[in-house]
Image (cartoon, rainbow, N blue to C red):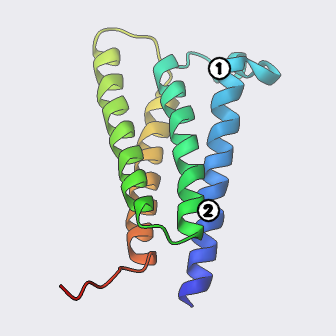
Amino acid sequence: MKKMITIFIIAVLAGFGLITFFMSSSVILDLFNIRLIQGNYVSFIVWTNLICSFIYLISTYGLLKSKSWTVALMGIASLILVAAFSSLKIYIAEGGIYEIKTVSAVIFRISMTLALTIVTYFLIPKKISLL
């Protein structure tokens, strides 16, 4: 059962990473005229998402190989997103132009990343030390 859950989480993490990479790079490079569709996007949030997409994909590999550093890497992604959200709040307070969906998306991404971090923590076997 644990193996099936691990495979499912690997698929979710990989999918989340690939979708995040596609959407972020599409906005940055203006592929498929996505900037127009996204409206008033916040540039530093898009770049944060792009960075996190690489972290998600590397973490997918780490989870696949049961590497202990995976949890730390996912924790770093969580911290990056929380810092970006704090910066977004400051940006909004100073009158920055944004879409309300950006705020919702960042909250969703933080929640998803924290959930994946916690699940990853429990899925990776712990090494038992005799000392």
Q: In the image, what residue occupies the spot 44% across and 53% down?
A: 113
Residue 6 x, y percent position in the rendering:
57, 76
Q: Residues within 10 Å of mark 1 (few under 14, many from 20)?
A: some
Q: In the image, what residue occupies the spot 73% across and 17% down?
A: 30
Pointer 1 residue:
28
Residue 109 x, y percent position in the rendering:
47, 45
- 66 or 111, which lies in front? 66
Pointer 2 residue:
12
Q: Amino acid at mark 2?
A: Val
| Residue projecting furthest to the front | 131
- 61 or 90, which lies in front? 61
Residue 24 x, y percent position in the rendering:
63, 30
Q: Amino acid at mark 1?
A: Ile
- Tag 1 or tag 2, which sits nearer the N-term? 2
Q: Quadrant of the C terminus?
A: bottom left
Query: SS at mark 1?
Result: helix
Query: SS at mark 2?
Result: helix
| Residue projecting furthest to the right | 32
Residue 23 figure quarter: top right
